[in-house]
Amino acid sequence: MRGTTSDGAPEPELGLSLSTAGAWTVIAVSGEIDMYTVERLREAIRQLIGEGRTQVAIDLTPTEFCDSTGLGLLIGARRRLADAGGALVVVCANTRIRKLLDMTGLDKVLDVREAVPSE
Amino acid sequence: MNAAKHDHRPDSVTVRFAFTPAAAYVRAARLVAADVASHAGVATGLLDEVRQAVGEACTRAVLRHRDSDIDDLVRVEFSIGDRFVAKITDNARDLRAKSESRLAPAGYRSDARANDHDAIEEDTLSEEITLIVLGGLVEDLVVTGPDGERGTTVTMSWPLPGRASGSDH
């Protein structure tokens, strides 16, 4: 649900939708990931780790915008999930964000896939 | 005659503003950037690049102010001349000293999120990634400073169709 600013305009919002695909917990992210909204995604990952759900796929395909704050979060999430014995998959069929991952070399560091893992 | 007067466009246009170094205002800055660039005539295919690049530069400025624990405004200037030029200026001086403080225990920081190790680590990563993204994204990119008097200025420019193609600022 979107909040509104004092003049009634919609605030930027990050939409997180959780689902399960085999052993993976999938977080589909809609909206804009930036330094203002990133904390919600960080908290969602913390919560999953706390619940012992450490096989996590972050689906950026529906994401409208992602900046370097979001990329920093992916690196941190990968480390925290690995430390907890799990793994991170980044799902991205979104050409704009895929370009960012390629440009920064994160496509080599992160497990980036075109589709949500099936098992 | 009046129409001709109203249609007159100055040779050079400047849009300048400043914002409190808080995450909430970075989105506003990048949306203004895309809007001003669109009015300036930057090719539609480059507007996403302008939005991303200005957002990255503003994010970097906010992180630098946060890292230095200063509340000074982040300054943004767009100018339209031969090219569309965006300048984002922070006021965080003395980068080397601040790099050392980053390595200090979290309790050293007066930041409200001082105990949030994950966020601080990711912010540090993000500040470094902003420059990588800017370098990959923007063909004409200059970062100056910091020195003892000033912080850094990120200057970027994009071509305007029908204008001279020089990249001098």
Image (cartoon, coloured by chain):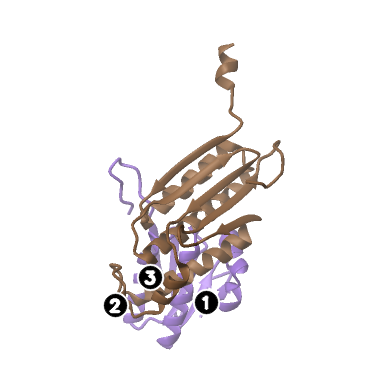
Chain colours: A purple, B brown
Above or below residue B151? Residue A47 is below
- Rounded to the nearest angstrom, the CA distance separating label 2 from label 1 is 43 Å
Q: Chain of mark 1?
A: A
* Secondary structure of residue under mark 3: helix
Residue at 45% across / 66% down in the picture? Answer: B94
Left or right, A3 with respect to B142, comes to: left
Q: Chain of mark 2?
A: B
Reading the image, the residue beneath label 2 is B107
Q: CA distance from mark 1 to mark 3?
A: 24 Å
Where's residue B35, x and y in %? 51, 41
Residue at screen point 27% across, 43% down: A6
Say yes or no: labels 1 and 3 on the same chain. yes
Q: Which mark is residue B81?
A: none
Q: Residue at x 52, y 37 (%)?
A: B14
Q: Is residue B125 above or below residue B36?
A: below
Q: Quadrant of the N terminus of chain B?
A: top right
Foreground mark, 1 or 3, reads: 3
Which residue is disc 1 drawn over? A118
* Residue at mark 3: A42
Please state which of residues B107 and A109 is positioned toward the viewer in this rendering.
B107
Query: In the image, what residue occupies the spot 52% across and 40% down?
Result: B36
Q: Position of residue B91 (x, y in %)?
A: 42, 57
